[in-house]
Image (cartoon, rainbow, N blue to C red):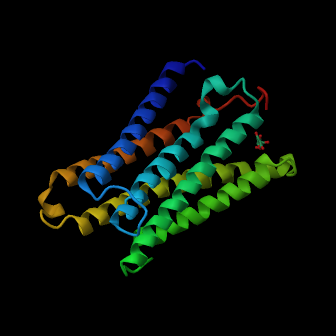
Amino acid sequence: MEDYGRFLAFLASSLLVGFVSVILSLVWVLHYREGLSWDGSAAEFNWHPVLIITGFVFIQGIAIIVYRLPWTWKCSKLLMKFIHAGLNTTAMILAIVSVVAAFDFHNAGNIPNMYSLHSWIGLAAVIFYSLQLFLGFAVFLLPFAPVRLRAALMPIHVYSGLTIFATVIATALMGITEKLIFALKNPAYSESPPEAILVNCLGLLLVIFGSLILWMASRPHWKRPPAENA
Ligand code: ASC
């Protein structure tokens, strides 16, 4: 790879931005909100943003670009498929637990479920992500699918994977926005208290993280060379 240094700069930036996003989500719920617990309270709900940002955004982002790490090109393709699938499975589990936390909190407090656009798009994203994972296992990881079927489905797998990832980030931004509007009362969101500034910055970092991942994933010359240990 002739621009190895440039790839490393993108990778390091995305890891830094993703890591800081996770930290900011923790600062948000631990310092400004009710902390973390599993008891139906607001502190249970707080797992929702933390696990979505850790799993559904950060870990999914890494899973997307894992084939592009140049030092893995000497590893077997099968090993890399297991790492890609393992990271995506971890992200899916964290996303599901985080959705359970949100539902639990609503049900314990008689707050209605599934009325907001955030919840509609978010649930669709979890369902399509699970389908994507299941089809990915069945077609690309298990040894049964013929190469022609794999080749036909690969562009669809890549397209739907990137689309789901972008949708997850858009959904996180909607969730952050509605939470700030619901939770900030005195002072209100419109008065820009420190919590609002911190969480707006978190949203900005999520957009930057997504942009970096999508850039790395869409440069053809950063692809794993097909012939090496395919
Ligand atoms: C796979 C795999 C690939 C693609 C290719 C079809 O399972 O390892 O490189 O599918 O065979 O595009």
Quadrant containing the C terminus is top right
Residue 94 in picture, x, y percent from top left: 53, 54
Q: Position of residue 5 (x, y in %)?
A: 49, 19
Q: Nearer the viewer, residue 123 or 186?
A: 186
Left or right of 111? Residue 126 is: right
Using the image as rendered, state which of residue 180 and residue 29 is in the foreground.
Answer: 29
Q: Give x and y (percent) for residue 16.
A: 40, 33
Looking at the rendering, in which quadrant would you find the N terminus?
top right
| Residue at screen point 15% across, 64% down | 188
Question: Would you place residue 79 above or below residue 161 in this image?
Answer: above
The correct choice, above or below, for 27 with respect to 117 in the image is above
- Report x, y in % for residue 161: 60, 52
Seen from the viewer's position, the closer of residues 6 and 173 is: 173
Kindly tell me whether residue 218 is visible in this rendering: no
Q: Residue at x 59, y 66 (%)?
A: 127
Residue at the location (86% across, 47% down)?
A: 143
Position of 230 compared to 155: left or right?
A: right
Quarter occupied by residue 222: top right
Is residue 103 visible in this depiction of the protein?
A: yes
Task: Work out whether 25 lies above or below 117.
Answer: above
